[in-house]
Amino acid sequence: MMKHSEWLELYFQKVSESSEEGAAAVRFARGKKIRVGLRRARKSVGAFWTLGRSFYLNTAHYTAESALENSRAWTLFVHEVCHLQQGVLTALSIYGELEAWQIEFRLFKKLAGKKLRPELEELLSLPLTLERETLKRARQLMTKFAGFWYGAWMLPLYPIHKEVLFWVTRKQFD
């Protein structure tokens, strides 16, 4: 059984070597001292971040060993680090999810070298914008891919401070 510190170095190496996006995510995680590990979560989640600056792969899908060989485990790291870079207000919005999903699945598509499921291809084609109809479509596509229990329906379209302002003024953001 490998020590956590040994596994973490191997995981960081795999993620870094996968792409420039992976290398940038690892640099950020090292610089901000993000804790990285494996924990159980609901089945609809591949990985998750916490307010305490942690990243976890879901043990329902990954083991320490499989995380070293599975490119999805690397692209999920890039996705969750994107959320940690965004900050909590943006990360907990459909806008924040759209950005992270696009980064993750563009990278996964590049690494896999094949077309993705239709809902992901459509999601990648959406502009990263604060246009509400676009964000509503992104939410539908996320739910179609990840299922109801992924929880996209719970998130505001905009970061919450902008969502509240929208509901007060009814003015969209650019």
Image (spheres, helix red, strand yellow):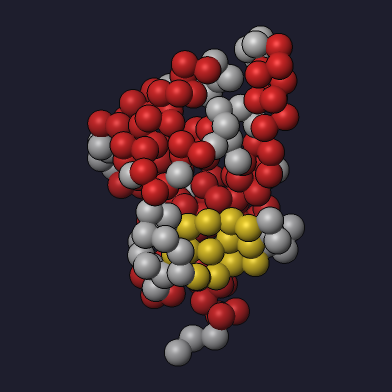
Using the image, determine if residue 10 lies above or below residue 17.
below
Residue located at (53% from left, 64% from top): 56
Tell me where residue 146 appears, x and y as whole percent. 35, 45
The image position of residue 118, as x and y in percent, is 25, 31
Q: Residue at x 60, y 41 (%)?
A: 92
Total tally of numbered discs in the picture: 0
User: In the image, is 149 to the left or to the right of 36?
Assistant: left
Q: Quadrant of the C terminus?
A: top right
Q: Is residue 30 visible?
A: no
Residue 46 coordinates in the image, percent (x, y): 42, 56
Q: Quadrant of the N terminus?
A: bottom left
Of 29 and 171, nearer the camera is 171
Tell me: 88 left or right of 63.
right
Could you tell me which residue is drawn at 69 percent across and 25 percent down? 164
Where is 80 relative to 64, above or below?
A: above
**Can residue 172 be seen in this snapshot?**
yes
Give above or below for 64 relative to 75: below
Task: In the rendered view, tell whether residue 151 sits above or below residue 14.
Answer: above
